[in-house]
Structure formats: C-alpha cells, structure tokens
Image (cartoon, rainbow, N blue to C red):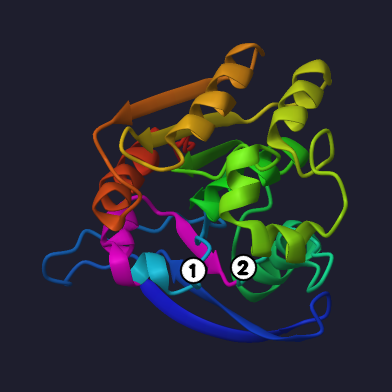
Amino acid sequence: MALLQCQFYSEVLGLSTKMTVILPQNTTTQIGMNNVAGSHKHPTLYLLHGLSDDDSIWLRRTSIERYVASMGIAVVMPQVHRSFYTDMAYGGKYWTFISEELPALTRSFFPLSDKREDNFVAGLSMGGYGAFKLALRKPEMFAAAASLSGALDIAGKFINEFFADDIQLVFGNNPIGGSDNDLLSLLKQLDQSEGPKPKLYQCCGTEDFLYNDNQTFLKACQETSLDLTYDEGPGDHDWAYWDVKIQDVLNWLPLRKN
C-alpha cells in the first residue's frame, strides 16, 4: 500500500486543507503483507471521521491500511472539522466540499474510478451521519454506505441538546426536520424516487449513548424498501468497537470482481 498525507487548496472552502489517502500497490516481497492492486482505476472508500477527530484518526486508531491491503481498494479520509458534513450557517461549505469538490479533486490527483459501483462511503458518529447523507442525497454516486455509531437522528431532541453549540453553528436557526439535512426525511424521499438506491449498513453498540437515535433511524428505514444490513451487540462509543466493526464493513462492501 501507498500512504499519502495530502495537503491541497479547496476552492469551495477558500482555504488549504488536507486528507489522508491509502492507495493499492502490488507487492511480492513485502514481509507480512499481501498487497493487491487491480489493473484498472481503483474502487474507492471515502472514510469519514467523527466530531472531535481529523483525517488521520482512522489510521491512528485502527489498522485500516492493513485491513484493505488485499482488497485492491483506495481509501480517502478527508478533514472536515466539526461541520457535520454540511454547508454551515457559520462556517465553511463542507457539504459542497465533500459531495462535489473532493471526489473531483481526488480523481484528478489519483487513478480512482468514477463509476458508481466502485464508490462507497463509511464513517463513525458524525461521520456516520455524513456517510448516510452522502448516500441518500447522492445515490447516483455511491453503491453502498455504512454508519458506525452514527448521529443519525439529527433533528431529534437528544442530538440537538447534546451537541447544542455545534448544531447552532452548523444549522443556525434553519429547521432541520424535513430538510435535506434530515436523514429520516431523506429515507422517504429516496424510497419514493426512481433510479439507483445504495445498500446501507448500520451498526451501533448497545451501550452507546447514540443507541436510541440509531433505533429511530432503523425503524424509519425498515418502513422503506431500502436494502439495510443492521448489526448491534455489546459496545460503547469508542475505538475498541469501531476497530472491529470497520472490518465487518469492509467484508460487507459489494466490491466488483476484476
């Protein structure tokens, strides 16, 4: 694998930012690793961080580089600060950045596939919200999305109280419920629409403080025809849980066979 720490300028954000990228590489003599890279442009997983973290966190807290080595998949981990992957009321346009500018930039920098069936997104906590929002609002871009302990009921009372300061900065006084930032509303819209619908994977530990909000999303999704794989079990809102579950997500991804 090739590991890149990439600093670049974002026209959308109007500032320099960064991302961590893992690229597939074929090797035959590297001890302890089975690295694989296909002959075509790489399938890509956009892997999103949580509220208090940055683009380096998946690499620092898990063995994500080792987990994907034999899969022939690129992993793009962007930095979005505490934006909830949203065009902020008081801050940067992080939704436009993550949904439009970032995919175009990464494909201009690296040999990444632009085919829907080769693109996936996953994230934890705030990143779980971002992953599902990308998949539900941009189903033509992503074949599958996964949320690990996601903040999924963004319009709900608990999240609005627990993340009150961040919610105010991100959404201002704009109503969230029923908007394009409300995953529950997006579920219904996508279910009623024509066109492609991504596969969804949702997991949350039963001791997680976001467990009840995940149950709200689960019930809403079960009322649709969307393809959702749900997993729960003992676990808290921590890296011991996410390090295990990201491996389950990788095994679940609908990768095409070359």
Earlier-in-chain disc, 1 versus 2: 1
Q: Residue at x 28, y 62 (%)?
A: 62
Q: Which residues are magenta?
A: 60-79
- The image shows residue 62, relative to residue 128, as above or below, that is below
- Amino acid type of the residue that numbered disc 1 sits on in the rendered structure: Ser
- Amino acid type of the residue that numbered disc 2 sits on in the rendered structure: Arg
Numbered badge on residue 52: 1
Where in the figure is residue 196, as x and y percent of width and height?
Answer: 73, 27
From the viewer's perspective, tell me whether residue 91 is left or right of residue 245. right
Per the image, label 1 sits on a secondary structure element best described as loop
Instruction: Give the quadrant of the N terminus.
Output: bottom left
Residue that label 2 marks: 82
Numbered badge on residue 152: none
Which one is nearer the viewer's eye here, 72 or 120?
120
- In reply to whether residue 78 is colored magenta, the answer given is yes
From the viewer's perspective, tell me whether residue 17 is left or right of residue 65. right
Where in the figure is residue 239, as x and y percent of width and height?
Answer: 29, 57
Q: Residue at x 32, y 38 (%)?
A: 248
From the viewer's perspective, tell me whether residue 190 is left or right of residue 47. right
